[in-house]
Amino acid sequence: MNTKHLSIFFIILCVVTSCYKDESLESPVKEQPLSTDPIDIFIQSNFIEKYGVAVRYKFIDRYLEPDKRVAPAKRELVEPMLDFLTNFWIEPYMGVPNGRRFFETHVPAEVIFIGSPIFNDDGTQILGLADAGARITLTEVNDIDPENLDWVFRQLGTIYHEFAHIVHQRYNLPPNWQQISPQGYTSPGSWYNITEDDALQRGFVSPYASSSYNEDFAETVAFILFFPTFYETYINDVPNCTTPECLARNEGRARLRTKYNAILSHYQQVTGVDLLAVRAIIQEKLN
């Protein structure tokens, strides 16, 4: 799959709504009203009672800024989307040592389903949002297609990226993280001026990863988990390099190997979770 397509959706995750917009958000789970609706009963039993996470698919305008336009999730697609989340987000953590404890302790309080992308007044689109580790908004639910890897990777990238933010929010970044690519970072408003190849040469998995230390961490975690050719693209050097561009890409891979090892060690130390074991389950499901 073209890696250019992969990074497009990651870079929009926090453009409009900062990942750290409101650290004081209270858990909304207790606000979930009792309902006799079969979908609500399913959510109550399988998400709220099990993990303390509410899934919102109705009245979605209340979760968006007034200048945003969206289509709601189609009712008949809510349960298939819930099954998708269970399969690719919950089960991989449930299947590894310490994963259940980690997931249940750190899962966001709310997941929002929106049927379409989020449309801005200028015609641009947003494919995912998150608020301070308390809420993740997933779009394009009405396009659900587990056979379409573009769609699958957009959803998984949003989930894994935002879930990774919770780790550094609670446990800080890995030691010396800021020193791995000290000259490569751009800024929240200028990362889109660099190409995929520029990002790799600087030691980043995507242009958006260069926008800040925190986004670099979350983006790299997400790519470790879902990107099938992660090692071939970002970790393994190309042998017999002779051109300056090839040598620069290998220098970027050397920085990424340092980040990769730092992330694996950090997760193991602060959460007890082996990310590679989680990746193995995800990759088996993708095959």
Image (cartoon, rainbow, N blue to C red):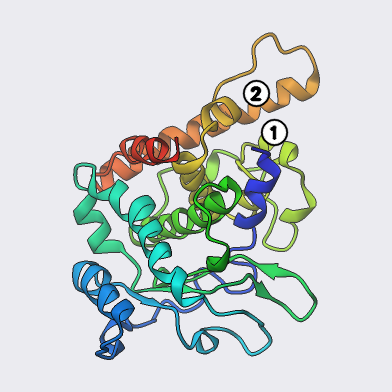
Q: Are marks 1 and 2 in contact (CB under 8 Å)?
A: no
The circle on residue 2 is none
Task: Give coordinates of residue 267: x percent, y percent.
Answer: 33, 44
In the displayed structure image, the side of residue 266 where residue 245 appears, left or right? right
Res 71 → quadrant: bottom right
* Residue type at the position of mark 1: Gln
The residue singled out by tag 2 in the image is 250
Camera-side residue: 59 or 198? 59
Q: Of helix, strand and loop, which one carries label 1?
A: helix
* Residue type at the position of mark 2: Asn
- In the displayed structure, 190 sits above or below 17; it is above
* Residue at the spot 38% in from the left edge and 68% down from the top edge: 79
* Residue at the spot 74% in from the left edge and 36% down from the top edge: 197
In the displayed structure image, the side of residue 185 where residue 75 appears, left or right? left
- In the displayed structure, 263 sits above or below 116; it is above
Q: Of helix, strand and loop, which one carries label 2?
A: helix
Camera-side residue: 153 or 96? 153
Q: Does residue 139 show up?
A: no
- In the displayed structure, 245 sits above or below 275; it is above
Task: Give coordinates of residue 180: x percent, y percent.
Answer: 54, 38
Q: CA distance from mark 1 to mark 2?
A: 7 Å
Q: Quadrant of the N terminus?
A: top right
The numbered mark, 1 or 2, whose residue comes first in the sequence reads 1
The residue singled out by tag 1 in the image is 201
Q: Count residues near mark 2 (Cα–Cα under 10 Å), then give few for <14, some for 14-19, many for 20+.
A: many
Task: Give coordinates of residue 217: x percent, y percent.
Answer: 49, 49
Res 200 → quadrant: top right
* Residue at the spot 36% in from the left edge and 34% down from the top edge: 280
Q: Quadrant of the C terminus?
A: top left
Q: Does residue 69 show up?
A: yes
In the displayed structure image, the side of residue 85 where residue 268 appears, left or right? left
